[in-house]
């Protein structure tokens, strides 16, 4: 029997041009794809997230077979399934005459640790290929970070713009004369019957089978399967991409921070699950957005804002994740210790903004970035919730959440758990921001304009209490000079009342 190379394809490596397949002979390769219990349960992932990944994997396996590859696919309900990546590698090595293993590097420290041990465990050479779907290599990010006191995304983003040439003029200068048009992307929205809607894909037979299996095996996991809407093939993901580019991109910039009751999507792309699992190519998508701007079909603030999220934030947080190391998840700069409130798993709260964001998250495994940062994240921050518990929740409930992208966004940007590596200040706010950027407050049982009393919006007292209890650590942050000036100018009795209100509310949690 001729010797063969085993090429594991992980659930976030669903790309035809994944580096592990480059220059490999199809008749000497066995592609191994594995649905394993350990990956579905190391946190309690949202049911729809598990269903999306498993269905996309099964569809990708079918496409690979049609492309001439030999695919050994292990389903979750296979009675011989060992339940882990390493266990399935061992079984595959026994089933096939394997003389080497070749794999694209994993996105997470946890999985990379497994892979790095396989050569000794199985006594075959293991080649770990770099994941070239990203613009910046690990070394490039480390070189950029070396010697810097602050690792701000804005400056890394400019390097990515220069490397890719996206939205640069013939002289290498940024289009329009500025690198960043975020100041133009903060308009509140109003309900509009003509607002574009993303495509909702009806489950095919493969997806229906996966949904049934997930419903049975992961009944105690959060979230619903009733509203499953994801694309599960590259072709479907491309349809969603086309829908966004043709109908929503032009308004995306203006309204990317807006929130409307009952409308989870607005002008957002809904493409992040497909970028992060590999069905869509990030750079190719950004190039088309830049081309649409060049052709006059998208305004600069929309094109730049969208491209910044991908080659800026997405690349940057991956760099931070690998640069900071596996202990990053345990950091807790503000020493926040409160458990995550139960309503994060039910949506059962009278605070309408939280009810909306959490409710749609449980229904759809989706919320856009401002809902995550300034509603669910902001509340957890000012309530003093343990940032690791917040991290676990975000990792569980969102279909696009893999630790490399979710952890820095949650612990660093949202919860300030890293002490300012990512964020220049804590993203804490009172109800005023939510009122400005949404229509939630108008229908809430709480009054956003009241700071104290039974009708007062809880965000208001919690915001001031957050500043007061963390003053020793935050008072020298120059972006908080004005809030602390306002706090210190308050009458002492008012300060005490606000803190008492906040503590009473937190005790009721």
Image: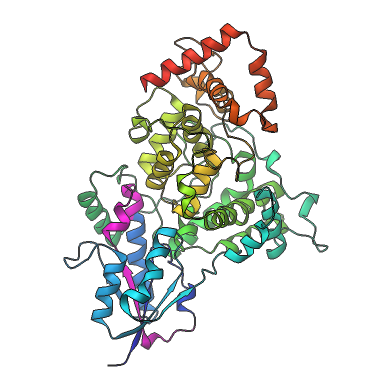
- Give the residue displayed 59% in from the left and 41% down from the top: 256
Q: State the residue in front, 383 or 314.
A: 383
Color theme of the render: rainbow
Q: Is 131 placed above or below 243 here?
A: below
- Give the residue displayed 37% in from the left and 87% down from the top: 28
| Residue 114 drawn at (x, y percent) | 37, 65
Position of 288 compared to 127: left or right?
right
Q: State the residue in front, 505 or 438.
A: 505
The verdict on residue 163 being magenta is no
Residue range (magenta): 23-51
Position of 141 compared to 6: left or right?
right
| Residue 301 drawn at (x, y percent) | 69, 46
Quadrant, the N terminus: bottom left
- Give the residue displayed 50% in from the left and 26% down from the top: 440
Query: Which residue is the extreme one toward the left?
Result: 79
Quadrant, the C terminus: top left
Position of 368 compared to 296: left or right?
left
Tell me if I can see residue 106 in this picture.
yes
- Give the residue displayed 54% in from the left and 52% down from the top: 244
Query: Which residue is the extreme one toward the bottom?
Result: 1
Tell me if I can see residue 203 in this picture.
no
Q: Is 320 placed above or below 469 here?
A: below
Q: State the residue in front, 365 or 162.
A: 162
Position of 277 compared to 37: left or right?
right
Query: Which residue is the extreme one toward the right?
Result: 171
């Amino acid at each position: 029997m001729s010797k063969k190379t085993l090429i594991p394809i992980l659930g976030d490596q669903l790309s035809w041009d994944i580096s592990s397949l480059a220059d490999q002979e199809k008749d000497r390769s066995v592609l191994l794809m594995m649905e394993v219990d350990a990956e579905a349960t190391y946190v309690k992932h949202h049911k729809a997230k598990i269903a999306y990944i498993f269905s996309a994997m099964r569809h990708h396996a079918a496409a690979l077979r049609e492309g001439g590859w030999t695919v050994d696919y292990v389903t979750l309900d296979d009675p011989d399934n060992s339940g882990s990546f390493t266990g399935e590698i061992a079984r595959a090595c026994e089933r096939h005459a394997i003389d080497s293993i070749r794999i694209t590097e994993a996105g997470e420290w946890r999985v990379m640790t497994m892979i790095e041990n396989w050569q000794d465990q199985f006594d075959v050479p293991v080649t770990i290929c770099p994941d070239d779907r990203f613009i910046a290599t690990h070394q490039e990010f480390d070189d950029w970070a070396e010697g810097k006191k602050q690792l701000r995304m804005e400056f890394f983003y400019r390097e990515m713009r220069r490397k890719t040439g996206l939205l640069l003029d013939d002289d290498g200068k940024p289009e329009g004369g500025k690198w960043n048009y975020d100041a133009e992307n903060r308009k509140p929205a109003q309900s509009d019957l003509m607002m574009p809607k993303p495509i909702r894909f009806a489950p095919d037979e493969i997806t229906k089978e996966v949904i049934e299996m997930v419903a049975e095996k992961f009944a105690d996991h959060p979230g619903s399967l009733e509203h499953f809407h994801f694309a599960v093939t590259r072709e479907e993901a491309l349809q969603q991409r086309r829908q966004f580019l043709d109908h929503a991109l032009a308004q995306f910039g203006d309204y990317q921070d807006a929130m409307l009751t009952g409308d989870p999507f607005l002008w957002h792309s809904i493409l992040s699950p497909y970028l992060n699992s590999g069905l869509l190519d990030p750079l190719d998508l950004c190039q088309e957005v830049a081309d649409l701007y060049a052709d006059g079909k998208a305004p600069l603030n929309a094109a730049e804002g969208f491209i910044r999220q991908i080659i800026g934030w997405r690349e940057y947080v991956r760099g931070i994740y690998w640069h900071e190391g596996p202990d990053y998840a345990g950091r807790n700069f503000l020493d926040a210790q409160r458990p995550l409130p139960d309503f994060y798993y039910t949506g059962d709260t009278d605070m309408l903004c939280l009810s909306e964001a959490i409710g749609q998250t449980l229904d759809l495994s989706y919320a856009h970035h401002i809902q995550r940062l300034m509603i669910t994240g902001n509340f957890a921050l000012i309530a003093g919730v343990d940032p690791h518990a917040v991290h676990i929740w975000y990792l569980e409930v969102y279909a696009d959440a893999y630790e490399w992208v979710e952890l820095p966004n949650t612990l660093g940007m949202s919860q300030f758990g890293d002490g300012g590596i990512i964020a220049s200040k804590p993203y804490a706010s009172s109800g005023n921001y939510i009122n400005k950027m949404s229509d939630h407050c108008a229908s809430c049982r709480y009054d956003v304009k009241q700071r104290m009393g039974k009708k007062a919006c809880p965000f208001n007292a919690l915001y001031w209490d957050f500043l007061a209890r963390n003053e020793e650590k935050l008072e020298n942050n120059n972006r908080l000079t004005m809030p602390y000036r306002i706090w210190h100018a308050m009458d002492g009795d008012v300060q005490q009342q606000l803190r008492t209100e906040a503590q009473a509310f937190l005790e009721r949690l």
